[in-house]
Amino acid sequence: MGNYKNLSNEEAIAKLKKLAEDIKVCMFCTELTKAPFSTRPMNLQEVDAAGNLWFISGADSDKNFEIKQDDKVQLLFAKLSSSEYLNIYGHAHIYTDQSTIEEKWSPMAKAWFKDGKKDPNVSIIRVQPEYVYYWDTKDGMMVSLLKIAVAAVTGKQMDGSIEGKISV
């Protein structure tokens, strides 16, 4: 059921960037060794040319505290409308220097930080992926749904999805 295509180098970063920036919001998980682990929705700022994922966060947040205790994180992206999914395991690094804040700042973040990018509570999180796995449709959602319907009627196996590891 589905095709496998592992990606590396520029192709891997392009796929990671396309999927993550298109989906935009992920479940950002910390304290991975605890049950239940901590999770919260986070808005992605960008995926850079090296495949790092960047977020804006409150310096005094539980998330930042948890990252300082253990930098291992899991990011889960899902876009049901187009059957696109990303599972990212990596290491988080927190930045509080003004130059990084200036570079990664988004005006939308002012909703959480009343003094904008000068707010002393602003921090930036960079997640460096160690393991990435993706699921995607080969032909888009409508064609995939049609293929599923045809497969259900004919009994033939559908060939509409693609998945694999992304090595960055």
Image (tube, rainbow, N blue to C red):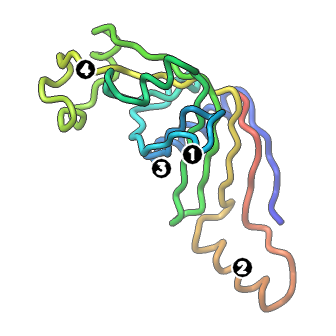
* Element at label 4: loop
CA–CA distance between discs 4 and 1? 25 Å
Residue assigned mark 4: 121
Disc 3 is placed on an element classified as helix
Q: Position of residue 130 (x, y in %)?
A: 69, 26
Q: Which mark is residue 76?
A: 1
Residue type indicated by callout 2 = Ile
Rendered-image quadrant of the N terminus = bottom right
Dot 2 falls on a residue whose secondary structure is helix
Tell me where residue 131 sits by quadrant.
Answer: top right
Mark 1 → mark 3, Cα distance in angstroms: 10 Å
Tag 1: residue type? Leu
How packed mark 1 is, by other alpha carbons closer than 10 Å (few <14, some 14-19, many 20 or more), is: some
Give the mark nearest the N terminus, 4 or 2.
4
- Among numbered discs 4 and 3, the one appearing first in the sequence: 3
On screen, residue 86 above or below 102: below
Q: Between disc 3 and disc 2, whose residue precedes? A: 3
* Vertical position of residue 165 compared to residue 128: above or below: below
Q: Mark 2 — residue? A: 148
**Considering only order in the chain, which callout, 1 or 4, is on the residue closer to the N terminus?**
1
Q: Amino acid at mark 4?
A: Asn
Query: In terms of sequence position, does the residue under pointer 1 or pointer 3 come before the other?
Result: 3
Are dots 4 and 3 in contact, CB under 8 Å?
no
Residue of label 3: 23
Identify the secondary structure beneath mark 1: strand
Q: Nearer the viewer, mark 1 or mark 3?
A: 1
